[in-house]
Structures are given as C-alpha cells and as structure tokens.
Amino acid sequence: MPNVHAQTVPVAGAQLPLILVWLIAGGVICTLYFRFVNLRGFGHSLRVIRGDYSDRAHPGEASPFQALSTAVSGTVGLGAIGGVALAIAIGGPGAAFWMVIAGFIGMSTKFAEVTLAVKYRKVRPDGTVTGGAMYYVDEALRRRGWPRLGKFLAGFFCVAAVGGSLTIFQVNQAWAQFNAVTGFNQAFVFGLIVAAWVGFVLFGGVKRIVTWTDKLSPIMCLLYILACAVVLGANYANLPHALATIVYEAFAPQAITGGVIGALIAGFRRAAFANEAGLGSAPMAHATVRTREPMSQGFAALMEPFLDTVIICLLTALVVVVTGVYQTSASDGIVLTSEAFATVVSWFPIVLAVVAILFALSTVLSWGYYGEQAWTWLFGERKASRVSYRLFLCAVLSIAGTLDLRQIVNIVDSLNFAMAIPNLIAVYLFLPELRADLAGYWQRIVLGGGKKNDA
C-alpha cells in the first residue's frame, strides 16, 4: 500500500499532503453542490434518527439509530481524545478551528457516500445486508464502460479498508492511559484481553455488533461530555480566552507550529481521521439500515461529523487549551489530554481511562465489521473467509499496545486515506444522480410531510 502522505505540495512554507487536498475538495464540492444540505437538512436528520420514518417491515437489519450508533462508534474513537491533543501539539491551538471547519464540510460528504451505500447495497435471500463503497465504486465505473477499472478500484478500496480496520491506534492509546493510571505494564496481556472481547462480539455477527454499539456510543459520549464540562466549568473564566486563542492561532499561529498552513494541515488531518468523511468506511454500517429510501439514511449520517468533530473534538481542544497544558507539557496524544483532566481533579485520569477503553472498544468493533465486509468482498462470503479475518484482526490487536505511536499514526492514516481515492471518484461520478434524488426526496418526504412508511 503506498504512503499517501508521501505526495505533498509546498504551500506557504509547509508541505500539504495531496490526499488532504482531495478530502477538502470533496467536502467543499458536496456542500456547494447540494446547496448546504449540512445546514438545511439538520432538522430532518434528527427526525430520521429518532425513527419517525422507520418501519420494521423495511429491508435491512438495523434501525436508523443503531446504524448511526455503529458508525459513530467507528468515528468517535480515541482520535477525538488523543488525536486532537496530537494535532494541537503539532499545529498549535489553531488546529482545532480547522478541525471544526473540516467537520462542517464533512457532513455533506458523509451524506453523499451513505446515500450511495444504501442505494447500491446487496440484500441477500435471508434478509441480511452488505454494502459499502466497494459496491458503488464498481457500479459507477461499470456504468461508464470501465468495468475492469471499477473492479480494480473497488479492490484497492477493500485492501486499504482491511489495513485501516487494524485499529491499533485505538488499542495503543487505551493501553497508554490504562498504564498511566494503574501502573499495569503488561501491554501484551492488555491487548489479548481486548482481542478476546472483540472476537466474541464479531463472531456474533452484525446483530451482536449493533446491540453493543447502540449501548456503548451514548454511554461513552455522555460520560466524556460530562467530564469535559466539569473541567471547562472549573476554568470558566479562561474559556473566552481559550476560544479566542483557537480562532486567532488558526490564522496567525506561532511560527514554530508551521504557520497557518501548519495548523490547517494538522487540524484537517486529525479531523479526517476522526470523522472519516470521504473515506467510505461508515457507509458499510449505514448500508444495514432498515429503509426503502436511501436518501433518508444519508440525512441521518449528517450527524456523525457534527457529533464527532464539531462537539467531541472541540470539547477536547477546549480542555487542552483552557488548562494550558499544551504549553507546559512535552506529552502528546491521550497523555496530554489526561494531564489536562488532572489539573482539575486528581482522579479524573481514571475517568478518562474508562472512557478511553470504551472509545477504543467501540471503534475496534465498528472497524472490525468494516474490515470483514471488505475482506469478504475480496475473498468471498464463505464462513472460513470470515473466520480467517477475525483471527487475523485479533492477532494484530493483541500486540497493538507494544507499538510506537507516531509510526502507528502514519501507517493507519495512510491506509485510511487511501480509501478516499476510489470512494470520492465514485461520489463525483454519481453527483448528478444524487442531486436529482435529493430534489425528489425533499419534495416528497420533507416538504410533502412523508409518513413512517414512506422512507
């Protein structure tokens, strides 16, 4: 797999990875092309998620909330805790501003890719469902008379997805926080425990996965938001200054962080890793939803980048900046976030350790499902194929705690971002079709007051 970060262009003295240009362009184009669907569709998104348009008679395996929970579990991981702190350590507080911008435009990209995944998913005779970017990438190129290229790009996506599903960053950062709090120094044992639990859930199939994720996601998010609220409440007098610092340094950061472009690169890179908009990963979870209307789940998916990047990531950034630890500590990643929590309550790193483990487990579960879908597309849907992937994943996770953080970030980012190349090609090819579908859906369901059975 090529290192997609190796290709850069010099911009204002900094090196801007071309893959980030690709992702930023995708978000901007989708936002403009669908006339800011990320804003005008926000209210409808909430109604879809709460089940206003869902029916158990619809084809699929999961409710809109369960599908969203699984996808959110894959996005709201330790990238929202350790990744944000890493971005601030590299690009300064201004990186947080660009993360929020990336989350905003990423809402539109997520809308497009999820709609395509549901529209071109495969419903098996037994009622189970599979879908994802590999299916609509193949379809997009086949329609234009390039079936071989479509198969190649779909296969390229799946290879990258399998590599990206080895969520070693999540387990590594959960181990780092657990080790810091408890002093337990057996990284391999920690990895084995995580791998055993992940194997247990994955062997239960998609129904067991969504059963776990629709419980883990709300608990872990609420617990983390409450902990951040306590830290910010204790530093409420410094909060306006922290917000001003984030905005100011987004446009006039210290030279040591690489200037404006350095902050932008750090922010967009971490945001892309955190919310996954444009990568084509979350569509595999949303493809399982019970619906007859693909566009409805596209609206539900709008909420992912908002929850992950605009809320969770911003809270982490505020905690790190308002406490000032980014200026005094040599740490980065989740350790820096932990130090920020400890400035308010000495035992808060224990709370963070619990949250970190929940975030890691939920992300590993979701990406384990994504990796399995990609693996079976490559090697067939036989039981032996699924078992081989699950064993492979568990073996890798067992050693995740022993690996170097910076090397992990570079490897995982490269694999994740490689997924975006074929995924966004297909999204671009389907843009006219999606805009026509959106116009019809908006008139029929949103303006027409569609009922439960309509979507």
Image (cartoon, grey):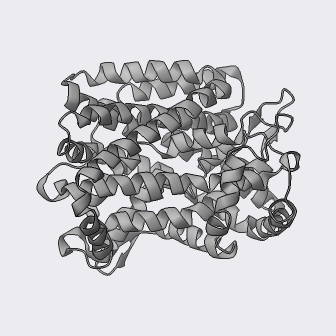
134 or 264: nearer the viewer: 264
For the point 52% across and 40% down, which residue is it?
73
- Position of residue 336 measured from the top left corner of the image (x, y, whole percent): 22, 47
Residue that extends furthest to the left in the rendered view of this protein: 328
Q: Can residue 413 be seen in this view?
A: yes
| Circle count | 0
Residue extending furthest bottom? Answer: 12
Rendering coords of residue 273 (x, y %): 45, 53
Decide which of 49, 117 is in the foreground and name it.
Answer: 49
Please determine whether, in this image, residue 161 is positioned above or below residue 215: below
In the rendered structure, the answer to whether residue 407 lies left or right of residue 5 reads left
Q: Is residue 151 visible?
A: no
| Quarter of the image where one finds residue 189 | top left
Residue lying at 28% horizontally and 79% vertically, measured from the top left: 13
| Left or right placement of residue 284 versus residue 94 in this view | right
Front in this rendered view, residue 15 or 69: 69
Q: In this view, does 140 lie to the left or right of 95?
A: right
Q: Give the image location of residue 68, x and y in percent.
A: 62, 43
Residue lying at 35% horizontally and 27% vertically, measured from the top left: 399
Point out residue 6 in the picture as x, y percentages from the top left corner: 39, 62
In the rendered image, which quarter is residue 63 located in? top right
Q: Nearer the viewer, residue 147 or 128?
A: 128
